[in-house]
């Protein structure tokens, strides 16, 4: 009787997993030892794919602060952005690899060895700067650079927050949703800081 009950419970569990696997999610490996929380959907893939490129541009903007005589506040902010978004890119690259999804090339060639650095910007992605804007930022100096950096990074962060909110609404993978929540929280705080720096 106990063996029969165990077999029935196992069959029911397998049917439940099969049903979950057909609702737009994906467990990546179909292994019985993979928890349901490993499922993901297209919103998760889009979030990781787009945010990798979005973060890479933010880090390219941060790279432009290197070697400049900046205010201590802006230097600290730039380093804060670098320390947060670099590891987040690596996390999202890992997800795409686990999900058997292509890893996008980025303008920094940070996460994809096939990138050639110069690439067309995705104008459909909220908050992304054009190549002309990036060139203008690089050419600026002193106070003009700091003001331009802050203004552009605020817009960039606002775009990332919009993308993060979409993931929270439409995503399925718990870790991706959690990262989206963290991006919204941390970048909202950084926008407050940048607005204060612009006003000072």
Image: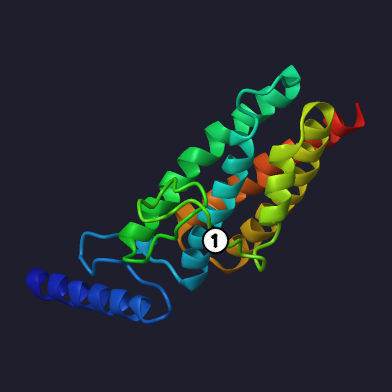
Left or right: where 102 falls relative to 158: left
Q: Which residue in the protein does label 1 denote?
A: 50
Task: Give the residue at x 58% y 69%.
Answer: 170
Of the pair 188 and 137, the residue shown nearer to us: 137
Structural crowding at the residue carrying mark 1, measured as other residues with C-alpha within 10 Å and reported as few (<14), some (14–19) or many (≥20) = many
In this picture, is 45 found above or below 151? Answer: below
Task: Give the residue at x 42% y 66%.
Answer: 40
In this picture, is 23 found above or below 54? Answer: below
Extreme front residue here?
139
Q: Is residue 173 visible?
A: yes
Left or right: where 10 falls relative to 157: left
Task: Give the residue at x 65% y 30%.
Answer: 65
Left or right: where 50 falls relative to 18: right
In this picture, is 3 found above or below 168? Answer: below
Quarter in which the C terminus is drawn: top right
Task: Give the residue at x 49% y 54%.
Answer: 106
Pinpoint residue 163: horizontal percent, then vertical percent.
64, 60
Left or right: where 39 falls relative to 50: left
């Amino acid at each position: 009787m106990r063996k029969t009950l165990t077999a029935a419970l196992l069959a029911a569990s397998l049917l439940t997993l099969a049903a979950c696997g057909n609702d737009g999610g994906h467990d990546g490996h179909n292994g019985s030892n993979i928890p349901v929380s490993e499922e993901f959907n297209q919103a998760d893939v889009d979030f990781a794919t787009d945010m990798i490129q979005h973060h890479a541009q933010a880090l390219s903007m941060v790279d432009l602060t290197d070697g400049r005589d900046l205010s201590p506040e802006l230097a600290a902010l730039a380093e804060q952005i670098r320390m947060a978004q670099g590891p987040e890119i690596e996390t999202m690259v890992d997800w795409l690899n686990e999900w058997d999804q292509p890893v996008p090339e980025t303008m920094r060639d940070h996460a994809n060895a096939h990138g050639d650095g110069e690439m067309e910007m995705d104008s459909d992605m909220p908050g992304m700067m054009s190549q002309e804007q990036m060139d203008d930022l690089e050419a600026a100096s002193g106070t003009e650079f700091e003001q331009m950096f802050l203004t552009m990074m605020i817009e960039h962060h606002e775009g990332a927050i919009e993308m993060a909110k979409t993931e929270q609404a439409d995503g399925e993978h718990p870790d991706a949703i959690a990262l989206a929540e963290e991006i919204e929280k941390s970048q909202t705080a950084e926008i407050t800081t940048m607005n204060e720096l612009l006003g000072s």
